[in-house]
Structure formats: structure tokens, C-alpha cells
Image (cartoon, rainbow, N blue to C red):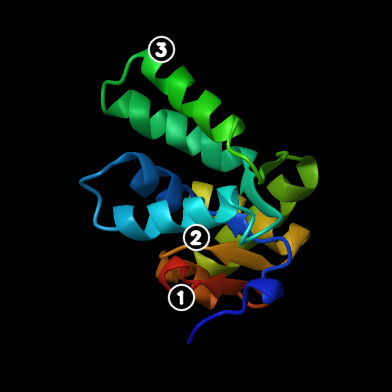
């Protein structure tokens, strides 16, 4: 099923696409690259990244031994991508995330990303199937955009 780009009002992009975008060996690299290209060129508008996704991204890179400079460089690149916004981590997000962990058993970071998406526009762009069990959250597979 192909999603009309107009239907993607203000979705949140998950950390899986950020990692796949920068890692040419990731199995989703081509999909993530195409997605980012569509965002940067304005074919998909109003896409946001949860601040929690950037935090998770940094923690993943740290655990893999990347330097502070390398991590900063990646974060600057994401920050400067045209048409890619950011959603702050708020107390409302933390409260909703707690509910999602309790009700659906989501991981800590998945609950933060899911809560951000629910509170923003109820849409998340991700290949993570765990989001499919969250009532009211529309999961958009990036391969179908």
C-alpha cells in the first residue's frame, strides 16, 4: 500500500531510519536514504524527529565506540537537513511514554518515540513492528512512502 504524501501531515521519524541513513551496511539504508531525500527535497513535508531519538542515537553511537566529534558531526548533519524538524522532550511525553510501557510493554526509547508521535500527529515512520500494537498510532513503513 503506497501512502499519499499529502496524508503524512506531521509524522515523527524513528531512530531506526536515522541509523540506517548513516550506515551504508544497514539493511534499510536505501530506504532511509530515499526517505531523507524526499524530506530534504520537500516531497514529504513536516517530518519531525523526537529529541529522544537523537538521544538514543547518541547513546547507540557511544556504545559502538564513536568519538564525541563523530557523534557531534552526525547530529549537526541531522540538525541542518532541510525540512526535518525536531520535537522536544516534555513532561507530557514522559507521562504518555510511561503509560505506553505499562500498557504495551514498549522499550524505554520506543515508548518515548511513540508518545511523541501520539501527542504530535499520531503517526510514526518506522520499520519497528512493536508500534503496531499501540492503539491510535499510525505506523508508516518508510518503504511504502
Q: Quadrant of residue 99?
A: bottom right
Q: Considering only order in the chain, which callout, 3 or 1, is on the residue closer to the N terminus?
A: 3
Q: Residue at x 43, y 52 (%)?
A: 17
Residue that badge 2 annotates: 106
Looking at the image, which is closer to me, 100 or 38?
38
Q: Quadrant of residue 102?
A: bottom right
Q: CA distance from mark 1 to mark 3?
A: 34 Å
Q: CA distance from mark 1 to mark 2?
A: 24 Å
Looking at the image, which is closer to me, 99 or 19?
19
Residue that badge 3 annotates: 69
Residue 9 horizontal/vertical position (percent): 73, 67
Looking at the image, which is closer to me, 89 or 83?
83
Q: Residues within 10 Å of mark 2 (few under 14, many from 20)?
A: many
Q: Considering only order in the chain, which callout, 2 or 1, is on the residue closer to the N terminus?
A: 2
Residue 12 horizontal/vertical position (percent): 62, 56
Identify the element where label 2 is drawn: loop
Identify the element where label 3 is drawn: helix
As drawn, which residue projects farthest toward the front?
Answer: 41
Q: Residue at x 26, y 21 (%)?
A: 65
Q: Residues within 10 Å of mark 1 (few under 14, many from 20)?
A: few
* Residue 9 shown left or right of residue 5 in the figure: right
Q: Considering only order in the chain, which callout, 2 or 3, is on the residue closer to the N terminus?
A: 3
| Vertical position of residue 118 compared to residue 109: above or below | below
Residue that badge 1 annotates: 144
Amino acid at each position: 500500500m503506497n501512502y499519499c504524501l499529502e496524508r503524512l501531515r506531521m509524522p515523527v521519524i524513528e531512530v531506526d531510519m536515522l541509523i540506517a541513513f548513516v550506515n551504508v551496511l544497514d539493511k534499510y539504508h536505501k530506504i532511509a536514504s530515499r526517505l531523507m531525500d524526499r524530506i530534504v527535497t520537500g516531497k514529504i513535508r513536516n517530518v519531525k524527529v523526537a529529541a529522544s531519538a537523537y538521544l538514543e542515537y547518541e547513546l547507540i553511537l557511544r556504545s559502538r565506540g564513536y568519538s564525541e566529534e563523530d557523534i557531534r558531526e552526525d547530529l549537526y548533519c541531522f540538525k541542518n537537513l532541510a525540512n526535518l524538524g525536531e520535537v522536544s522532550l516534555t513532561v507530557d511525553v514522559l507521562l504518555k511514554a510511561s503509560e505506553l510501557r505499562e500498557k504495551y510493554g514498549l522499550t524505554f526509547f520506543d515508548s518515548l518515540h511513540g508518545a511523541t508521535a501520539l501527542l504530535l500527529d499520531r503517526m510514526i515512520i518506522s520499520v519497528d513492528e512493536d508500534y503496531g500494537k499501540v492503539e491510535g498510532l499510525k505506523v508508516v513503513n518508510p518503504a511504502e512512502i
